Amino acid sequence: MSQKELKKKLSPLQYEVTQKGGTERPFRNEYWNNKGEGIYVDIVSGEPLFSSTDKYDSGTGWPSFTKPIELEGVVEKQEMLQDFSYQGAVLRVY
């Protein structure tokens, strides 16, 4: 999918996070407190990433999981983020 098509498909925040390495604000994002059962998928590719059965409350304000559905295709990147409400290491899945 071209960048032009992605900009049409995604919200500005979704585009920033998925294409430019941006970060949603903690405790103010769509899924941090979601209790629904199901599979979390990549918004761009549709690939399944995580199961709700592996979700836990990390206290960070972002959805957190104990493991991905499949390790293949998951790229881990550890980075330090600074925010008004949270400082620490975050594992971001690409």
Image: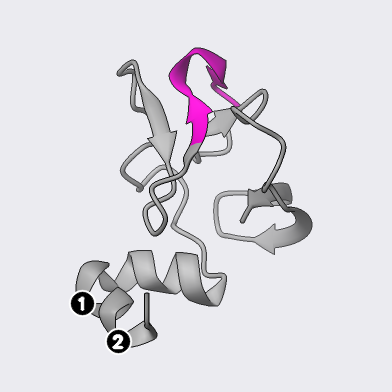
User: Quadrant location of residue 1?
Assistant: bottom left
Q: Say if 19 sits above or below 66 in the image.
A: below
Give the magenta range: 49-58
Q: Residue at x 61, y 56 (%)?
A: 94
What is the secondary structure assignment of the residue under circle 1?
Answer: helix
85 and 74: which one is in front?
Answer: 74
Q: Residue at x 23, y 69 (%)?
A: 9
Q: Residue at x 67, y 26 (%)?
A: 67
For this view, does 51 lie left or right of residue 12? right
Q: Is residue 51 magenta?
A: yes
What is the secondary structure assignment of the residue under circle 2?
Answer: helix
User: Quadrant location of residue 64?
Assistant: top right
Give the alpha-carbon distance from disc 1 to disc 2, as whole Å.
Answer: 7 Å
Query: Which residue is the site of mark 1?
Result: 8
Q: Residue at x 38, y 48 (%)?
A: 46
Task: Specify the amino acid type for callout 2.
Answer: Lys
Q: Is residue 39 magenta?
A: no
60 and 79: which one is in front?
Answer: 79
* Percent coordinates x, y for residue 49 in the rendering: 52, 37
Q: Is residue 32 visible?
A: no
Query: Which residue is the site of mark 2?
Result: 4
